[in-house]
């Protein structure tokens, strides 16, 4: 496919930069969530105060006085930070970066007296970057037959030196920073100000920074708190499904059009499945609802502060089931109330906002439409597009709203065979959208088109069509500039899916 002209404005901007940085942070945590969950289960079951206390596993003295290392301590001290460092290094410099980043992070871990999650998130990528720059110095200058020798010894020497730097310099510095952040959180809790964090967290979530906020900030700090006290309130600041549930319930009862019709299904996906991204478009279509999200979030945090409750490990995804499974044994009342009250507050405020604008919304031709980029006559019901049917002959997709003006679609030369749904993490909302479109394509009798999902950071430029939420499209274009990009407002039921199916049929794809 051809690219846009050179004078086309390059997608980007401050919001994209923040999203990319946040995604990078969360990208080190999310692939390793299973390890955090495993640690949470081991801690909950086998520690001395757990339901199945096992000295050899929980790491407490045996009845005969024998000291045991156990699994809990080594996992949080070594396993989890090293997994994070390895992933961060891989993100910068593939396997070689992961190896060097892991070696360097061992120095930070041993040199510090606290779990080094923040240190791992810094040292892993930093060490990989250093290795990458050094490799460029002798790239193409190594004699044939000596490549493996130079590569292995250079990585080993650099890893050793960075481990020493980590031990003597980096670990003390990161310890100070980590203790400062933990002290700031404790200060907010002591003064009862922690609920105010929702003023920043809830709008950040709506801008698709939810994974960055939760796994890039709260998870590292929460794990350190959990090791000290057995639980952390930080795991519930972003992951509480209550605010989203309240907003979707309000749309179920007081919404209009497609938003009202789709809200009940969205509740199942958000509250039970834990994919919070599903309710973001509902807030974006009526931005005043951010007040409801903030109020609900503050209520949930305040409830947990009042009852001094928390989770043992991250709840990922943010499903009510995951929340309850990770709830500390003394925290069920507070955690359940935090979800219920957060949902109640966000529901009441959302209901007031929706009721106040209901009459005006009903008078609109596109009432409740979740895909405003589509022409009004087609958007409300997702009907077949005549413009799209003639797309192949015209060679331009802009008329159907599939690409922005100025972008060229070359379907007449390269029919679509690969479609990628991309989101921040590549697991939640993108997987849901891929399933919906895959089913539509299958019903249309098309079996030569593959539909998959992945994280935006993992996109390549060898795909034909990329589908993203409209707030993430700019980032996707940076990764796959030659692909056709389609922006949607709702992954679950966008009218553009039918237009894409029509496009495939018009190309003669089977």
Image: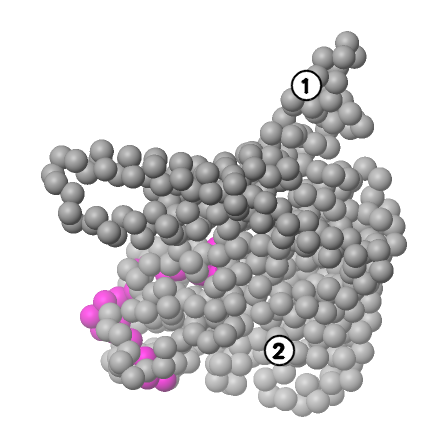
Q: Quadrant of residue 192?
A: bottom right
In percent of the image, x 63 and y 83: which residue is there? Answer: 367
* Mark seen at residue 68: 1
Q: Is residue 355 above or below residue 126?
A: below
User: Quadrant location of the N terminus?
Assistant: bottom left
Q: Is residue 234 left or right of residue 467?
A: right
Res. 23 visible in picture: yes
> Closer to the camera: disc 2 or disc 1?
1
Q: Quadrant of residue 401?
A: bottom left
Span of residues in magenta: 405-426
User: Quadrant location of the C terminus?
Assistant: bottom left
In percent of the image, x 52 and y 41: which residue is there? Answer: 168
**260 or 200: nearer the viewer:** 200
Mark 1 element type: loop
Q: Is residue 251 left or right of residue 112?
A: right
For label 2, the crowd category at 10 Å Cα-Cα, with few meaning under 14, some 14 to 19 and many 20 or more, is some
In percent of the image, x 74 and y 53: which residue is there? Answer: 183
Q: Does residue 244 show up magenta in the picture?
A: no
Disc nearer the start of the sequence (2/1): 1
In the rendering, at what x and y percent does residue 157 appear?
34, 37
In the rendering, at what x and y percent does residue 287 appear?
66, 78
Q: Which residue is mark 2?
A: 285
In percent of the image, x 63 and y 52: which residue is there? Answer: 177
Q: Quadrant of residue 115?
A: top right
How far apart are the alpha carbons under marks 2 and 1?
56 Å
In the rendering, at what x and y percent does residue 29 appear?
54, 48
In the rendering, at what x and y percent does residue 344 appear?
82, 64
Mark 2 element type: helix
Q: Main secondary structure of the magenta part?
A: loop
Res. 102 visible in picture: no
């Amino acid at each position: 496919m051809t690219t846009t002209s050179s004078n086309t404005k390059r997608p980007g901007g401050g919001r994209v930069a923040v999203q990319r940085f946040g995604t990078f942070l969360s990208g080190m945590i999310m692939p390793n969530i299973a390890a955090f969950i495993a640690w949470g289960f081991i801690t909950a079951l086998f520690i001395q105060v757990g339901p199945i206390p096992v000295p050899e596993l929980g790491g407490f003295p045996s009845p005969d006085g024998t000291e045991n290392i156990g699994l809990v301590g080594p996992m949080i001290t070594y396993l989890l930070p090293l997994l994070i460092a390895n992933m961060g290094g891989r993100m910068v410099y593939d396997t070689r970066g992961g190896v060097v980043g892991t070696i360097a992070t061992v120095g930070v871990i041993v040199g510090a007296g606290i779990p080094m999650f923040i240190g791992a998130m810094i040292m892993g990528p930093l060490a990989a970057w250093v290795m990458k720059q050094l490799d460029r110095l002798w790239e193409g200058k190594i004699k044939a037959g000596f490549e493996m020798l130079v590569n292995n010894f250079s990585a080993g020497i650099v890893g050793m030196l960075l481990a020493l730097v980590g031990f003597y310099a980096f670990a003390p510095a990161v310890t100070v920073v980590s203790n400062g952040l933990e002290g700031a959180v404790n200060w907010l809790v002591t003064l009862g100000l922690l609920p105010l964090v929702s003023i920043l967290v809830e709008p950040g979530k709506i801008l698709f920074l939810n994974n960055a906020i939760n796994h890039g900030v709260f998870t590292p700090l929460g794990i350190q708190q959990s090791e000290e006290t057995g639980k952390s309130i930080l795991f519930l600041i972003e992951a509480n499904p209550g605010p989203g549930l309240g907003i979707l319930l309000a749309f179920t009862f007081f919404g209009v059009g497609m938003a009202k019709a789709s809200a009940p299904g969205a509740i199942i996906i958000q509250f039970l499945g834990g994919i919070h991204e599903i309710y973001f478009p509902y807030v974006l279509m009526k931005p005043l609802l951010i007040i409801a999200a903030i109020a609900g979030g503050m209520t949930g945090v305040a409830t947990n502060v009042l009852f001094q409750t928390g989770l043992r490990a991250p709840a990922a995804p943010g499903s009510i089931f995951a929340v309850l499974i990770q709830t500390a044994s003394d925290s069920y009342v507070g955690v359940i109330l935090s979800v219920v009250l957060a949902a109640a507050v966000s529901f009441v405020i959302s209901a007031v906002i929706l009721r106040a604008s209901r009459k005006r919304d009903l008078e609109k031709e596109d009432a409740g439409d979740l895909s405003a980029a589509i022409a009004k006559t087609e958007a409300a019901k997702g009907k077949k597009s005549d413009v799209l049917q003639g797309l192949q002959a015209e060679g331009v997709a802009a008329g159907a709203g599939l690409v922005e003006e100025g972008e060229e679609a070359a379907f007449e030369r390269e029919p679509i065979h690969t479609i990628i749904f991309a989101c921040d993490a590549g697991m939640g909302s993108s997987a849901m959208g891929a399933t919906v479109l895959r089913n539509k394509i299958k019903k249309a009798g098309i079996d030569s088109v593959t539909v998959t999902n992945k994280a935006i950071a993992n996109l390549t430029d060898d795909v034909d069509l990329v589908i993203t939420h409209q707030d993430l499209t700019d980032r996707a274009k940076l990764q796959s500039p030659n692909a056709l990009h389609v922006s949607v407002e709702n992954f679950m039921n966008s009218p553009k899916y039918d237009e894409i199916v029509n496009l495939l049929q018009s190309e003669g794809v089977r």
